[in-house]
Image (cartoon, rainbow, N blue to C red):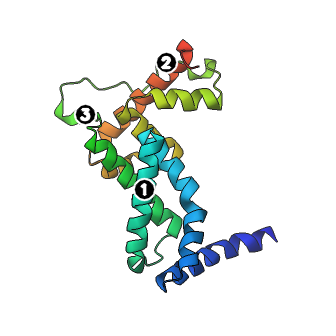
Amino acid sequence: MQAFLEITAPILHDELVEKCKQGDRKSYADLYQKYAKAMFNTSLRIVNNSGDAEDILQDAFVDAFASLNSFEYRSTFGAWLKKIVINKSINHLRKKKMDLIDIDKTQVAEVPNEETLDEKDVQLKVEEIKKAVKLLPNGYRTVLTLYLFEGYDHEEIAEILNVTHATVRTQYMRAKQKLIGLIKQGGIS
């Protein structure tokens, strides 16, 4: 029964999308209810402000519904919508002047490949990590979120943020070090 449900889930979502394309108002509401919470959480992890995340969520759905006829099922509707939400979240941060520095254009020395902090000695709790992530600067938080929580690789993040792969790698390593430092300091309450 579980395998049957896993196979039919995408079909049900495709039917909702098709009904929306035909103008069925209830299907729009059903599609919104199906994805709103996950997309809100995705945006919130990037922008770190619930009001901004709510605005981004609404804008993303407006754009998705307006462009629904161009959706061609090359991916799931959820993946397509998630990309819209992530792009809108990143654009929002760009408007706020997110602090990403292109390493190739600076005189900064290369960050060593080996991790200098002993991560094995640090016992982390999920809530501590969430609180510490919220304290990270926008650039660090964005790269860390896209990599760890959203599953993008460094090349994809570089393309999304329009920076070099080296910049993403460095921002990720620094974000991870800063996160570990925040947790070790115990400044999370």
Q: Which amino acid type is shown beneath numbered disc 2?
A: Gly
Residue 154 rendering spot, x and y as whole percentages: 39, 45
Vertical position of residue 169 compared to residue 67: above or below: above
The nearer-to-camera label among 1 and 2 is 1
Three-letter amino acid code at the position of disc 1: Val
Please name the amino acid that badge 3 sits on. Answer: Ile
Q: Estimate the x, y position of residue 138 in percent, counting from the top left.
A: 37, 34
Residue found at the very far top of the displayed protein: 185
Q: Residues within 10 Å of mark 2 (few under 14, many from 20)?
A: some
Q: Which residue corresponds to the image point at 38% horizontal and 78% vertical from the top-left? A: 70
User: Which element type, helix, strand or loop, lies under badge 1?
Assistant: helix
Tell me: 178 left or right of 100: right
Q: Does the image show residue 30?
A: yes
Of badges 3 and 1, the one in the foreground is 1
Residue depicted at 57% across the width and 76% down the height: 27
* Pick the front one: 52 or 161: 52
* Residue that appears at 45% across and 44% down: 51
Kind of element beneath mark 2: helix
Q: Which residue bears the numbered disc 2?
A: 181
**Mark 3 = which residue?**
101
Between marks 2 and 3, how big is the CA–CA gap? 21 Å
Q: Secondary structure at mark 3?
A: loop
Labels 1 & 2 near each other (Cβ < 8 A): no
Numbered label attached to residue 112: none
The residue where tag 1 is placed is: 85
Q: Position of residue 45 (x, y in %)?
A: 48, 42
The reply, left or right, for residue 126 in relation to residue 59 is right
Label 1 or label 2, whichever comes before in sequence order: 1
Image quarter where the C terminus lies is top right
- Quarter of the rendering containing residue 33: bottom right
Residue 81 place in picture, x, y as percent? 46, 63
Mark pair 3, 1: CA separation: 23 Å
